[in-house]
Amino acid sequence: MTDIAASSRLPGAWQAGAVAAGDPPDVKRVLQLALAAIWMLDAVLQYQSFMYSRAFGQMLAATAPGNPGAVASPITWDARLIEHHMVLLNTVFATIQLAIGIGIAYRPTVKAALAASVAWGLGVWWFGEGLGEILTGGASPLTGAPGAVLIYALIAVLLWPSDRFATAPFVAARAVGLTAARAVWLIFWAAMVFFTLQSANLTAQGLHDQISAMASGEPGWLASIENGVAGAFAHHGVTGSVVLAIAFALIAVGVFLPAPAARAVLVLALVLAAFIWVVGEAFGGILTGGGTDPNSGPLLALFALLFWPGRGSGRLSESPLAAVQPRAVPAAGTDD
């Protein structure tokens, strides 16, 4: 028997390994890497010189007003502490975010890093974002409510590397199950409807003022976009907010629809995420040198992709190798 013939009769486990090596990457893993990349971007932004100035502490302190005392007091204390030890603490903050991103990207530490992502995200949501202003009556999804880091935590839970429900119709349900994943989606987008319809957002100039305020400090081309869109909403804030609320409501029920309709609704979610990121958040202010993170836009898009209907296999596409059973090569000198 030749070496070729011998290799054709290696154990099935080796053949299965060869097929697996040719498989496309797991969708969940790709989305985990996307989350890791955003955390690493956060770290880079946190290392900016602006964050080593008193302005960083002042920015954090500005999230306290309007919140209940039990929420506001710890924020104020934290902001003062950072102002007095800004170099040390900001370096620690940036390094933690970098470690989370690297940890998610490195398979052996993905669970620990995702757990850290949840814990750190919830902490920053309180001390860095003032709970996304959801208790102040002024929260607006257009400018980041209910808070970008809260979405980090939700995504980390849904991307947990456990496939107890491996045949689920979308990635978000593979770790927690279909019912729980749909409940998370419904509650999140229903909250977006609620915040959009708060009285502070239902004023004639509400959307205009929110958008135009984002133009300050931005490059000229982006400031022109902000001011142009703000002008379109002048005196039409109520109509604009109602339209946004209707869109959020459609998205909320999207994951309960048949796959073709669900995909259409998720496309709407991706479009709105892009609109919010560019128009409402000005890319999170990262072009001004003072943005600590890209804000909620990219997280909303990633959140939507977790619910994209698939075939339950968890693969980006079916590998041609998976459909072909390896066939033995006849030994030299045989008639097979």
Image (cartoon, rainbow, N blue to C red):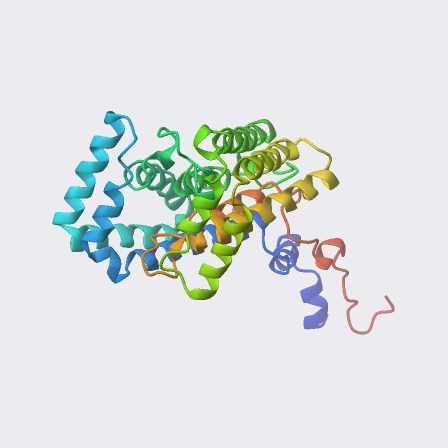
> Can the viewer see residue 107?
no
Give percent across and percent down for residue 26. 58, 51
Left or right side of 198 for 177: right
Give percent across and percent down for residue 144. 43, 43
Give percent across and percent down for residue 254. 65, 35
Give percent across and percent down for residue 112. 37, 43
Q: Residue 156 sits in which quadrant?
A: top left
Q: Residue 91 sits in which quadrant?
A: bottom left
Looking at the picture, does residue 99 appear above or below residue 303?
below
Looking at the picture, does residue 233 appear above or below residue 238?
below
Q: Nearest the camera: 61 or 310?
A: 61
Looking at the picture, does residue 111 appear above or below residue 319?
above
> Can the viewer see residue 113?
yes
Q: Nearest the camera: 264 or 159?
A: 264
**Which residue sits at x=15%, y=43%?**
81
**Which residue sits at x=37%, y=52%?**
293
Instruction: Report the quarter where the C terminus lies.
Output: bottom right
Instruction: Report the quarter where the N terminus lies.
Output: bottom right
- Farthest-out residue, right: 335
**Which residue sits at x=63%, y=57%?**
24
